[in-house]
Amino acid sequence: MLPDLIGATRDYWRKLDAVEAAYQRNELTLEEVDAEVKALMVELGQTRRQLLRDSWAIAQTFVNRQGEALAGVAALGVLAYVWLTVNF
């Protein structure tokens, strides 16, 4: 199943807002805020990379299974383009 990138982004912003609120209440130092933000960015980056890996794997599987059909559609498209350019 694909990771929920929109949900992960919402969680990132929610956590970022919590870090900002803690900083405003003087519960965190600037260095702690930097460390928290860096950790949150790493977490969101991992989710994004996982989504890209999974999407690429799905695309590869689709092409492997439907390769002949895709080649046929591409060939028809090329023939239609050639016919249109020659006749007009």
Image: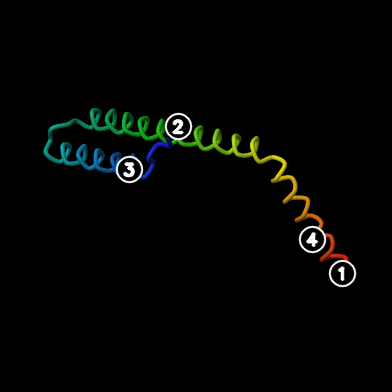
In which quadrant of the rendered view does residue 63 lie?
top right
Residue type beneath disc 4? Ala
State which mark lies toward you, 4 or 3. Answer: 4
Pointer 1: what residue?
Answer: 87
Residue sitting at x 74%, y 45%: 71
| Residue 7: numbered disc | 3
Marks 3 and 1 close (CB-CB < 8 Å): no
Marks 2 and 3 close (CB-CB < 8 Å): no
Q: What is the CA distance from the residue labelled 2 to the residue labelled 3?
A: 14 Å
Q: Earlier along the polypeptide chain: callout 2 or callout 1?
A: 2
Q: What is the CA distance from the residue labelled 4 to the residue labelled 3?
A: 43 Å
Q: Secondary structure at mark 1?
A: helix
Q: What is the CA distance from the residue labelled 4 to the residue labelled 1?
A: 10 Å
Mark 2 Cα within 10 Å, few/some/many (few <14, many 20+)?
some
Pointer 4: what residue?
Answer: 80
Q: Nearer the viewer, residue 59 or 68?
A: 68
Pointer 2: what residue?
Answer: 50
Q: What is the CA distance from the residue labelled 2 to the residue labelled 4?
A: 39 Å
Q: Position of residue 51 (x, y in %)?
A: 46, 36
Q: Secondary structure at mark 3?
A: helix
